[in-house]
Image (cartoon, grey):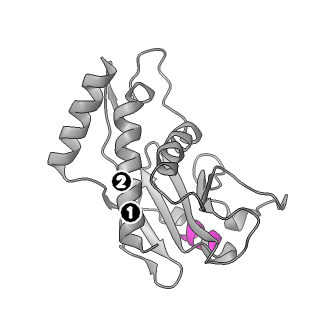
Amino acid sequence: MILADLQSRLRIALTNTLVEEWTLFTPTTGTSRPSERTIGFHLGWYLRQTIERTWSVDAEYDRSGMVLEPSVRLTGAEQHIPNLIVHHRGQLGPENNLLLAHVSVDEATSEDHTDVVAAQTLQHRFGYRYAMLLDLRLQLEGRRASVTPYWQWATLEGGPETSEPVPVYTARVLGEITERARAAGD
C-alpha cells in the first residue's frame, strides 16, 4: 500500500472516529481528557473497516514479550509505546509491518522532536513501512470541545515526510466534520 492510500484510509477512520465517537472528546461528565489508548482503539476500529482483511490492526501487540528499552519508547509525560499498529501477526519485515502509529490528545506546538525520533527508531528496529504521529490538539472550553488534528508521517526508506506536523484536514473540511460530530452527539 502506498503512503497516499494509507493516509486517505486513516483520514476516513479519523473522520468516523470524530463523528461517531464525539462524546469521547466532549466534557459531558467529569473533567478528564480521553486517553490516547481509547482514541487509538476507536481509530483502529474504524481503520479496520477500510483496509484489506489480510492486515491485523492491533494496539500494543507484542507477542515476543520484549521489553522496550527507554531509547526506543515514545517519550512524553508518560512512557508511550505505539497505540496502533497494522501488521501481519507473527511475521517480520516491512512487507508484514505496515504502520506504527502514536496518538496524542494534545502535544501541540512542542519544539521537541523526540517523539518523531523515537517513532523512527521503533520503525527501523521492527521494519514498519510507515510511522505516523497524530496529535488531536483537543481544546476544551467549558462544555464545548474542539479538535484540530495534525499528523506527521515517516517512511522506512525516506524518513520524515515533513519537517513539522501538518493539518489532517483543511479548515473548511474540519468545520464540516465538527458540525456533523456535534449534531450527532446532541
Mark 1 in CB contact with mark 2 (< 8 angstroms): yes
Classify 10 Å Cα crowding around label 2: few (below 14), some (14-19), many (20 and above). Answer: some
Tell me residue 127's x, y (percent). Answer: 64, 76
> What range is drawn magenta here?
117-122
Q: Is residue 183 left or right of residue 73?
A: left
Q: Which residue is mark 2?
A: 11
Residue 134 is a magenta residue:
no
Q: Is residue 141 left or right of residue 36?
A: left
Above or below — where is 183 with respect to 113?
Answer: above
48, 82: nearer the viewer: 48
Kind of residue indicated by mark 2 = Arg
Q: Is residue 148 left or right of residue 173?
A: right
Q: Residue at x 37, y 37 (%)?
A: 18
> Which of the 4 image quadrants contains residue 71?
bottom right
Q: Residue at x 14, y 47 (%)?
A: 172
| Secondary element type, mark 2 | helix
| Secondary element type, mark 1 | helix
Q: Is residue 66 visible?
A: yes
